[in-house]
Image (cartoon, grey):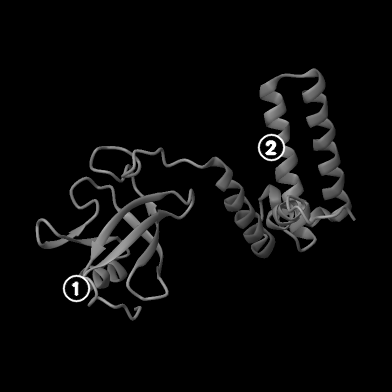
Amino acid sequence: MLELDFDKMNGLIPAVIQDNETRKVLMLGFMNEDAYRKTVETGKVTFFSRTKKRLWTKGEESGHFLNVVSIKSDCDNDTLLIMVNPVGPVCHTGTDTCWGEKNEEPIMFLKNLQDFIDRRHVEMPEGSYTTSLFKSGVNKMAQKVGEEAVETVIEATNGTSDRLIYEGADLIYHLIVLLTSKGYSLEDLARELQERHSSTWKKH
């Protein structure tokens, strides 16, 4: 349990709700100490309704619960950031977020894919294609990246758009596997590209 300051707003603190996968901000609610405690105990976000003057668990009527992944407080311990996996739309109007946004951010799936491949590298479950790649050795993995790169080039120059996307996805997947086997990750590539985007970056 976090040590929170409920006194500044007469017993309430704001709670920012953010999707753990897409990183979209879904809604803002308020909690009193009982709501916070129930959220921690049940793993489902519970607010204090300022209009109804009672606790209400998001989804208690609709079934659209907010399943808690993590809870953090800010530097003053008077605001919460709660990462969740939402079940269905969040807003009472039926939209994904209370700002009318679609809760989609496909680029964020690459992080989930990296996390998945990391787990495969540690657990090495039998019957997994990713496991078989790790077991094949660096040379085989590097060869597979080369093959997928050639196939991507072929589709780009003399193929279809659908096949280009398909082969490009294969290339990225196999590249992540190769990087992981060498102790690196997609985040390392992102960091390198970020440095290159800086005005002070110089080519090696």
Image coordinates of residue 109 in percent, x first then y, are 57, 46
The crowding category of the residue bearing disc 2, from other C-alpha atoms within 10 Å (few below 14, some 14 to 19, many at least 20), is: some
Question: Of the numbered discs in the image, which one, if any, rests on residue 169?
Answer: 2
- Sequence-wise, which precedes: disc 2 or disc 1? 1
Rendered image quadrant of residue 201: bottom right
Rendered image quadrant of residue 100: top left
Amino acid type indicated by mark 2 = Ala
Q: Residue at x 66, y 50 (%)?
A: 128
For the residue pair 49 and 133, the one nearer the viewer reads as 49
For the residues marked 2 and 1, what is the alpha-carbon distance in whole angstroms?
50 Å
93 left or right, relative to 140: left
Helix, strand or loop under label 1: loop
For the residue pair 135 and 159, the one nearer the viewer reads as 159
Amino acid type indicated by mark 1 = Gly
Helix, strand or loop under label 2: helix
Q: Residue at x 40, y 55 (%)?
A: 18
31 left or right, relative to 168: left
The crowding category of the residue bearing disc 1, from other C-alpha atoms within 10 Å (few below 14, some 14 to 19, many at least 20), is: few
Q: Nearer the viewer, mark 2 or mark 1?
A: 1
Question: In this rendering, is residue 119 above or below 24?
Answer: below
For the residue pair 25 and 161, the one nearer the viewer reads as 25
Image coordinates of residue 175 in percent, x first then y, are 76, 47
- Quarter of the N terminus within the rendering: bottom left
Q: Residue at x 24, y 62 (%)?
A: 30
Residue at label 1?
11
